[in-house]
Image (cartoon, rainbow, N blue to C red):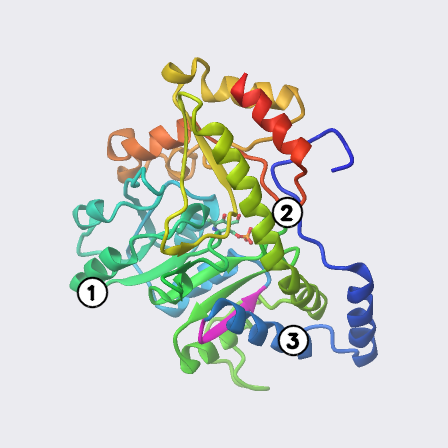
Amino acid sequence: MNNDRITVTSPLLPDLDELQVMLKEIWGSRWITNNGIFHRRLESALAEYLKVPFISIFTNGTLPLLTALQALRVTGEVITTPYSFVATTHSIWWNGCIPVFVDIDPATGNMDPNKIEAAITPRTSAIMPVHVYGNPCNTKAIKEIADKYGLKVIYDAAHAFGVEVNGESILNEGDLSTLSFHATKVFNTIEGGAMVMHDAETKKQIDYLKNFGFAGETEVVGPGINSKIDEVRAAYGLLNLRLVDSAIEARNQVAVKYRDALRNVPGITFFDDLPSVRHNYSYFPIFVDAGEYGMTRDELYFKMKERDVLGRRYFYPLISDLSPYRNLPSATKDNLPMAHKMADQVICLPLHHDLSYEDIERVLTIIEY
Ligand SMILES: Cc1ncc(COP(=O)(O)O)c(C=O)c1O
């Protein structure tokens, strides 16, 4: 880093000269959006990299969530987690459905499958869990409940790019999974996202829906939306895909240094890697127990900020505490004790591919005080 401020994230940027070559090709073709050659190339490259059978790329990570709920004709109530980014719950609301929050498992930050059954009513039609920080959900337990009650499962996998369990992509779980390729993510197309599906027929339907529902020049097969990604960002994505493995490895090295140093700091906890999981190191959340650490989470957060080290209280406040949702019956604090505890203790530390050794030391010196 060249300046003094240490940011929580930094975008992975493709080589500008290589991008220039691709831009010349796009300019030459005059085909700048609507399923052009770079769009198709990025979809194939992503399907291969992510080990998924079918993928459809989008202009951001919110629209695939909205579109997934539409495509599966989800109605009534959708069981979800309050410990996520607002887009998860917004997508449910924008589909005219009621979000029903269940508590999380502190071991992962993900929806606790043991809490799901009690939240099911005759109006429930789907479950929308999140692989928060890229930590895999307990997909087996969620599937068992979904199958028992005939519910759809849509995974918000915005954080789970490249995450695998026992060599299998986590994106193949559930009916559909969605990704975000926002600038802050491990893999980015500046703004962008995707949906992963199991079969060609569903991909065809999703591709129609993301293009206003057009199935041909004059035929519209459904109330679609416009969520296509353009050729420029698809080209940028193709180049970033070449860099993503080394970026993930660089992030891993930062995480290793953080863990080594923080393991013996009383009152600070964090997640360890799981042996069967290929993690993507998208975030490094720490949890501050004020009693043991001697400082509250906010005191530490603002102390870091004063010294130009920008952490992020991600996810605080909980979605269930935000004004559009706080009056929902499931949004009470009593219903969500673990989510409240995590939201009150969390700080995501700076974590990105070009964090230097000195940067890491500066972050740690503040926390170790
Ligand atoms: C869990 C989660 N879901 C959805 C989104 C929305 O993605 P986008 O910002 O690409 O629309 C994000 C983005 O930060 C996210 O973190």
Residue drawn at x 61%, y 72% as measured from the top left: 42
Q: Distance from label 2 to label 1 (Cα)?
A: 40 Å
Residue 79 image position (x, y, % from top left): 29, 51
Residue 115 image position (x, y, % from top left): 21, 44
The foreground one among 91 and 283 is: 283
- In which quadrant of the rendered view does residue 13 lie? bottom right
Q: Is 198 drawn above or below residue 261 in the view shown?
A: below
Residue drawn at x 49%, y 72% as measured from the top left: 55
Taking the magenta stretch, the answer to whether it contains residue 53 is: yes
CB atoms of marks 3 and 2 within 8 Å: no
Residue 291 image position (x, y, % from top left): 37, 15
Q: Is residue 69 left or right of residue 158?
A: left
Q: Is residue 10 left or right of residue 318?
A: right
Magenta span: 52-58
Q: What residue did someone put label 1 on?
A: 147
Q: Distance from label 3 to label 2 (Cα)?
A: 32 Å
Which secondary structure dominates the residues rendered in magenta? strand
Q: Label 1: how many residues lie within 10 Å, few (<14), some (14-19) or many (20+)?
A: few
Q: What residue did someone put label 2 on?
A: 353
